[in-house]
Image: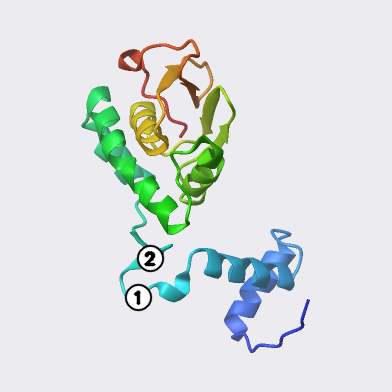
C-alpha cells in the first residue's frame, strides 16, 4: 500500500488519538482509512449545501423518533400500503448500482443496500428474510420488501424482537394479524 503524507489539523489529530487511547480503534491509520472509505461509500464529494446525494439518490437523515411518530398515526393496513409504495425506491437504488433487485440472485445485494441505509440487519435464504434491529414496523417492512423484491411474503410469528418474513409457500400467519414489532 502506498504511503501518503497529509497535514491534519491539531484538533482532529487529538480526536483521533483520543479514540486510540479509549481503545475504540487500533491506531491512527484505522481511523483515516475508515474515514476515507466512508467518504467514498457515501459519495460525500457529491454533496452540496443542504443536500445529501448517495449513489445519485437524494437522501435525508431522519431520526428514528420522527419515523416512529409518523408510523404511530397509521393502521397496520396503511403501513403495509405505504411500504408497498416505498418499495419502488429500492428498485431506483438498484438501477443506480446496475442491479435488478427483483431477481432472486440479487436479493442479498438489495438487502445490503438497505443495511447500508440503516434499515436494520438482514439475512436471506431460500425460505425467508430475517430483519434484526428494524427501523420500521413489521407491516411497513412487509409491504416494502414485497414490492421492492417482487415476491410474496408472509409474516412469521416470532417471540423475539426480530422480523421474519417467509417467502411464498412457507407456513405463516396473516399480515392482517401481524404485530407492530420493531426493536428499540
- Whether residue 59 is situated above or below residue 164 in the rendered picture: below
Question: Which residue is rendered at x = 49% and y = 44% of the image?
Answer: 110
Q: Which residue is mark 1?
A: 48
Asked if one can make out residue 108 in the rendered structure from this viewpoint, the answer is yes
Quarter where residue 47 is shown? bottom left
Q: Label 2, label 1: how many angstroms apart (C-alpha)? A: 8 Å
Q: Name the residue nearer the viewer: 61 or 113.
A: 113
* Label 2 crowd (10 A; few <14 / some 14-19 / many >=20): some
Q: In this rendered view, identify the residue nearer to me: 118 or 19.
A: 118
In the image shown, does 21 or 77 lie closer to the viewer? 77
Q: Position of residue 11 (x, y in %)?
A: 58, 81
Q: Nearer the viewer, residue 91 or 78?
A: 91
Q: Is residue 75 visible?
A: no
Residue at point 71% right, 67% down?
Answer: 30
**Location of residue 126 by image quarter:** top right
Give how far across and how far down residue 145 sits, in percent.
40, 34
Neighbours of disc 1 within 10 Å: few (<14), some (14-19), many (20+): few
Q: Position of residue 81 (x, y in %)?
A: 25, 30
Q: Is residue 14 left or right of residue 169?
A: right
Which callout, 2 or 1, points at the residue further toward the start of the chain?
Answer: 1
Residue 109 higher or lower than 1, as above or below: above
Question: Any mark on residue 53, and which?
Answer: 2
Asked if the residue under mark 1 is in contact with the one under mark 2, i.e. CB atoms within 8 Å, the reply is yes
Residue at 43 percent of width and 62 percent of height: 55
Amino acid at each position: 500500500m502506498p504511503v501518503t503524507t497529509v497535514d491534519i489539523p491539531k484538533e482532529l489529530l487529538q480526536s483521533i488519538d483520543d479514540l486510540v487511547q479509549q481503545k475504540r480503534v487500533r491506531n491512527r491509520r484505522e481511523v483515516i482509512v475508515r474515514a476515507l472509505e466512508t467518504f467514498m461509500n457515501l459519495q460525500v464529494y457529491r454533496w452540496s449545501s443542504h443536500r445529501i446525494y448517495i449513489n445519485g439518490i437524494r437522501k435525508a437523515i431522519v431520526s428514528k423518533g420522527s419515523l416512529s411518530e409518523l408510523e404511530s398515526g397509521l393502521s397496520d393496513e396503511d403501513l403495509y400500503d405505504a411500504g408497498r409504495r416505498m418499495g419502488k425506491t429500492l428498485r431506483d437504488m438498484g438501477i443506480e448500482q446496475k442491479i435488478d433487485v427483483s431477481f432472486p440472485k440479487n436479493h442479498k445485494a438489495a438487502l445490503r443496500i438497505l443495511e447500508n441505509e440503516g434499515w436494520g440487519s438482514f439475512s436471506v435464504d431460500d425460505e425467508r428474510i430475517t430483519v434484526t434491529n428494524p427501523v420500521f414496523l413489521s407491516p411497513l417492512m412487509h409491504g416494502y420488501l414485497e414490492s421492492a423484491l417482487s415476491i410474496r411474503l408472509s409474516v412469521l410469528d416470532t417471540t423475539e424482537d426480530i422480523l421474519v418474513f417467509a417467502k411464498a409457500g412457507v407456513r405463516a400467519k396473516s399480515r392482517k394479524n401481524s404485530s407492530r414489532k420493531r426493536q428499540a
